[in-house]
Amino acid sequence: MTAFNNLSGKITSSAFKELLLPKTGHQRDEVLVGPNFGVDNSVIDLGNNLGMAISSDPLSLIPTIGTKASAWMSVHLLANDMATTGFSPMYAQFVLNLPSNISLSTFKEYWNYIHFYCKEIGVSITGGHTGRLEGQNSVISGGGTMFLTAPLDRIITSNGAKPGDVIIVTKESALNSSSILAMSFPETIKKNLGLKVYQQACENFYHTSSLKEALLAAELLESNFELNAMHDVTEGGVLGAIYEMAYASNCGFEVYNNSIPTGDSQTKIMDLFEIDHRFCIGAGAMIMSVKKGNEKCLINHLESNSIKATVVGEFTINEHRIIENGIDKEFVFDGIDPYWQAYFKAVKDGIK
């Protein structure tokens, strides 16, 4: 049996397939999309062409970046998953497992921001659970679930990519991970890379919502025909997200490495921590699988709304390929995001 990775991060596709997928409780016919590796949302048929999409994710409470930024991540990483349906989230449940030493003032501040960011995107908080736990000192403060209802035939899922579809990446790689590293270790970033890089990375943090571009794409293109799938970029980065979408859709892909968009601040921060920007948490970017011939109008539509979009390759029938420095080779991904090791090593080493 495949073991867990010996590093932090998501479970691998093989471990998911062996450990979780065979045991998913009672099987109900109305569950149209259930647990699958690389699939952002489950979909339930409520009847009369009405569907419910559901997604869950960890919540963040990271002392080094503060309550406001932690709350932003908690809300918007959940909303990003929901956005891949082509619709906005509507409801949320939060389970808070807080450190036993958290102060009332800190909790109130954190929850005020959770409330504010949910209200801002039209999400109603419908319940959950709140408590403090002895020994809880993780940067993960629990978990959240978001829901929406929409016409069933218009809900997009990330396992809908088709061979021949063009792969589009919005914004740039490593937005989230580089921002957190800059906000967590500001003295190191400023000293080694300068104030401008630090400021740009901090500004990038609040560009890590991909809700806007998902809705823009869904309003322009016909769902499940011209816009076949979307997948937000989380652990594993841009390349990891493309791999996950291909895996979920039973496709291959061909990616042009030199086309993967990134920014100056991300590149410099990733190089400083000796990690590959292509494989690092990149919330804010979205992978879109678009029927060939529609990519130009989508890119123009997004760019007219100040959202960068780039063609990086296409989905194929089977093989996973990457063209790097002019060499076409097999793409291999071990499922490990190097960000986690870099972050916790810096904390352990006392980097400021």
Image (cartoon, rainbow, N blue to C red):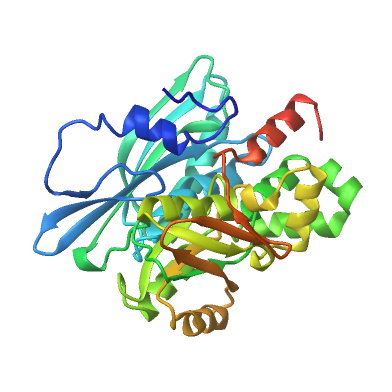
Report the residue at 36% width, 77% height from top. Answer: 219
Rendered view: 77 above or below 7: below
101 or 42: nearer the viewer: 42
Pick the quarter of the image with the C terminus.
top right
Report the residue at 15% width, 33% height from top. Answer: 26
233 sits left or right of 188 in the view: left
Residue 47 x %, y %: 9, 58
Residue 152 x %, y %: 20, 63
120 or 315: nearer the viewer: 315
Report the residue at 83% width, 46% height from top. Answer: 189
Report the residue at 49% width, 62% height from top. Answer: 287
166 or 274: nearer the viewer: 166
Rendered view: 184 above or below 278: above
Q: Residue furthest left?
A: 48
Residue 49 x %, y %: 13, 64
24 or 61: nearer the viewer: 24
Residue 209 x %, y %: 52, 59
Asked whether residue 116 is in view, the answer is no
Rendered view: 113 above or below 105: below
